[in-house]
Every structure is written in C-alpha cells, then in structure tokens.
Amino acid sequence: MRQVILDTETTGLRTEDGDRIIEIGCIELINRKFTGKRYHQYINPQRTIDAEALAVHGITNQFLETKPLFADIANEFLAFIDDAELIIHNAPFDIGFINYELQLLRKNLKRIDKKCKIIDTLTLARQLHIGQRNSLDALCKRYSIDNSNRELHGALLDANLLAQVYLAMTGGQSCLFDTLEITETVTANSMENAIIFTKQNRKLAIIKANDDELRLHNEQLIQMKEKKKCLWLQ
C-alpha cells in the first residue's frame, strides 16, 4: 500500500482571489513505513504573498524569485503522487489549490481527487476527538509527537509531522520505531532548508477516556441493552 503525506504552503487562502501554491512537501509511506523518499519544491507564484500568509510560513517573494513555476514542476510532482493514496490535513484546502494550478495549465489534466484516493486527517481527527481542537499542533501534543521545531509552517516539515500523527492516530504499530525523522528548520535570512535525519525510538501515546466520555459510553450501552442489542451488559 503506497501512501503519500502531502502539504502545501500558499500565497493566501483563496484561489478565487488568485492565490497560488508556493511550496509542496510530500513524504512516501509503503505499508505504513517511511521509505525515505520525498518530494519537496518551492514555486514562484508570480504574485505577491499576503502579509497574513507570510506571517505563517515566512516564505518571501524575494526568496521565490528564482524558483520554478508550477508549470515547470507539474509533471514531476504528478509522477510522484501517481497511484498513491494521499493523506492530507484539511484536504479540501490543498486539493483545491492543486486543482486550481492544474486548471491554469489548460492541459485538461485530471483533477487530483479524481486521480487519487484522499484521506482527510482533519475529518478523521474530528470523528475520533469530538469537540476537541484538532489542528496539527494540537494533534502532535495529543499523540506526544515533538513539534518543537515548528516555529513557522513548512510543507515538508508539516508533512513529516502529519505522517507521524496519522500513523499514531490509526494504530501506529511498529511504523514509528527506528524510522528516519525529518526535521526542517528555516532561517529568517537565507530561507534555506536544513534537513536533519536522526533515529528515534518513540513510544505510542496511550489515550484514556475521561469521566464524561465513560459516562456517555455507559449511557449508550444502557440504551442498547433496552433494545436488547447490547452484548457487553449481558
């Protein structure tokens, strides 16, 4: 099973306003294990980055001036995600931007959501943790995943964190043990990436139900018993 954890950074929040992708980060998993393969690319958006977006990711127009256009990297990017299941946090946002970029190429390319199966980890987290915060930072804290290097958002850094969150959230097993962890740091002046690979042994977080959750669970069992459909209370 080939999966690709994907994240993007953009000039702003709305394709309707002409916002564009400026960074793509992808990490490959096969059978829920890190393969070491990744795709990472900065992109010249040919437009100004919104101040609000700049505050989030710190990527400047000056830094992107010499980077390729999306049209220049589209084939390589599409080849990397081909036939993969895409794991994305808040998938409609990233998929919307990728489809917008493909539309601008005017090549009748298939929409990403028609090309790949997509798992939205935000939707999954909301189903598992009802009424709780489910941002990437919140999930890292909940599953004891170190995100101390995440002073600014970055597509490759966030994809790596999301991969660990996804594996922990969906069972984890041995996939988080003895794997390569990618830590991305971005300096404010040069905006150059320093990719550091370290081996870590990580213990899976044990999430226990609180009193309210146990109470609601018991109430549900009682309701099921009243309908003669509860084996746990027999």
Image: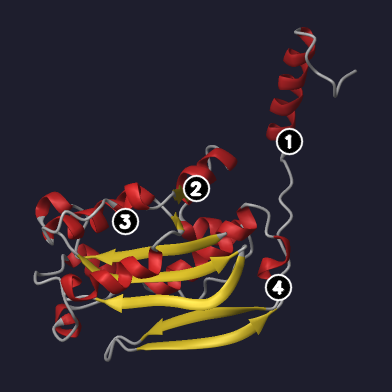
Q: Nearer the viewer, mark 3 or mark 1?
A: 3
Disc 3 to disc 2: CB gap under 8 Å: no
Q: Nearer the viewer, mark 3 or mark 2?
A: 3
Point out the tag, 2 or 1, that comes first from the N-terminus: 2
Left or right: residue 69 compared with residue 111: left
Residue 153 visible to the viewer: no
Tell me the residue that label 4 is attached to.
177
Q: Amino acid at mark 4?
A: Phe
Q: How far apart, in angstroms, are the residues tagged by discs 4 and 1?
A: 32 Å
The mark found on residue 172 in the picture is: none
Task: Classify the position of the N terminus by image quarter.
Answer: bottom right
Q: Residue 126: x and y, percent?
A: 51, 41
Query: Residue drawn at (39%, 75%), measured in percent from left and top?
Result: 39
Secondary structure beneath label 2: loop
Instruction: From the image, state whether disc 2 or disc 1 is nearer to you.
Output: 2
**Could you say which disc has been placed on residue 211 in the image?**
1
**Does 221 appear above or below 105?**
above
* Marked residue nearer the N-terminal end (3 or 4): 3
Q: Position of residue 70 (x, y in %)?
A: 19, 71
Please tell me whether mark 3 sits on a helix, a strand or a loop: helix
Tell me which amino acid carries mark 2: Arg
Looking at the rendered structure, the secondary structure element under dot 4 is loop
Q: Report if residue 186 is visible in the image.
A: yes
Residue shown at the point (41%, 73%) measured from the top left: 156
Q: From mark 3 to mark 2, how far is it between C-alphas? A: 20 Å
Name the foreground residue: 182 vs 222.
Answer: 182
> Looking at the figure, which quarter contains the C terminus?
top right
* Mark 3 or mark 1: whose residue is earlier in sequence: 3
Quick one: label 4, few (<14), some, or many (20+) residues within 10 Å? Answer: some
Label pair 3/4, CB-CB below 8 angstroms: no
* Crowding at mark 1 (Cα within 10 Å: few <14, some 14-19, many 20+): few
